[in-house]
Amino acid sequence: MKCYKAAIVDLDGVVWRSSKIIEENVEALKSILETTQLVFLTNNSTRTRKEYALKLSQILENEISPDQIITSGYSAAEWLRKTKPGSKTLVVGEEGLVAELTMAGHTVLTSDNWMSADAVVVGLDRNLTYRKLAAAHKAIVNGSLFVATNRDTSYPDVEGTVPGAGSIVSLLETSTGKRPVVDAGKPNKWILELALGKIRFLRNEVVVIGDRIDTDIAMAQENGLDSILVLTGVTKNPPRKLNGVIVAESLTSLRFDSDLCIES
């Protein structure tokens, strides 16, 4: 038996797929919440931490604080706050990203004001327009910092997968010939350290729970953390052997008690 006192939990592909709740994982998380500290870590920047906390509180029937949520939008905003505080930012993204940048003390510009941008921050944008892309392209070419919230090429949808923020980042890389100065999302260490900063236990007492080998599991492996790969999201046919990784069809298919002691 291996026991954990805290878990870093992904959202898309673990708690839900688009608007559909993944009940088999949610029921397990409700049980785990009784004795285990949970921090939720998502590359999805479309909502604020407060919005995610409210949604999770309803789903898990337990109060979840915004302080238990780390999004790639929050991660990018914090990185920029430490690197270039009070930046004038041009955003390719949705309201969640705009709000996190604003709360971190940055000014968000309109596309018409791209010439004033210190940084271009790119996340998932389901309302993407050519006008936004053109303004971002011009700002990056003219020297603005190119910041990516994450490089996920896709994310899970009810019917499979759909394009992710990484596909938009790649488009701008192609047009500008420049790479982002930072990828603020998983699997990078920066966002993991933000999550670990919320946890009151030692690293060897923490497990990462996610649905993607290239983000969740890679982040855990590269930083010496154990992980659980659930096959309820993007990954469906994982390699036969993943060192330090427990592979499960869902969280309810694992044999564990309420203290998150797992029979390996």
Image: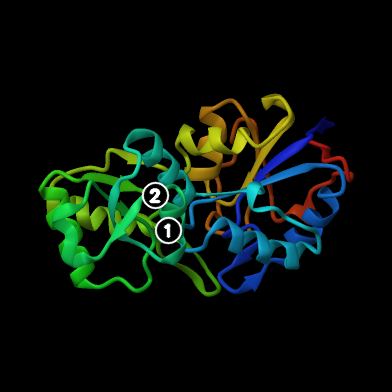
The residue positioned 54% from the left and 27% from the top of the image is 223
Are the residues at dot 1 and dot 2 in contact (C-beta closer than 8 Å)?
yes
Q: Residue at x 55, y 70 (%)?
A: 18
In the image, residue 114 sits, relative to residue 246, either above or below, namely below
Quarter of the image with the C terminus in it:
top right
Please give the label number shown on residue 97. 1
Residue 185 appears in the picture as rendered? no
User: Given the image, on which type of amino acid does mark 2 rest?
Assistant: Thr
Q: Is 140 placed left or right of 74 in the picture? A: left
Please state which of residues 79 and 244 is positioned toward the viewer in this rendering.
79
Q: Residues within 10 Å of mark 1 (few under 14, many from 20)?
A: many
Percent position of residue 119, x then y: 25, 47
Q: How many residues crowd mark 2 within 10 Å: few (<14), some (14–19), many (20+)?
A: many
Compute the Cα span from label 1 to label 2.
9 Å
Label 1: element kind: helix
Residue visible at 69% across and 66% down in the picture: 22
Of the numbered discs in the image, which one, if any, rests on residue 149? 2
Horizontal side, residue 114 vs residue 235: left or right:
left
The colour mode here is rainbow
Q: Nearer the viewer, mark 1 or mark 2?
A: 1
Amino acid on which the number 1 mark rests in the picture:
Leu
Where does residue 132 sit, x and y in percent of width and height?
Answer: 23, 67
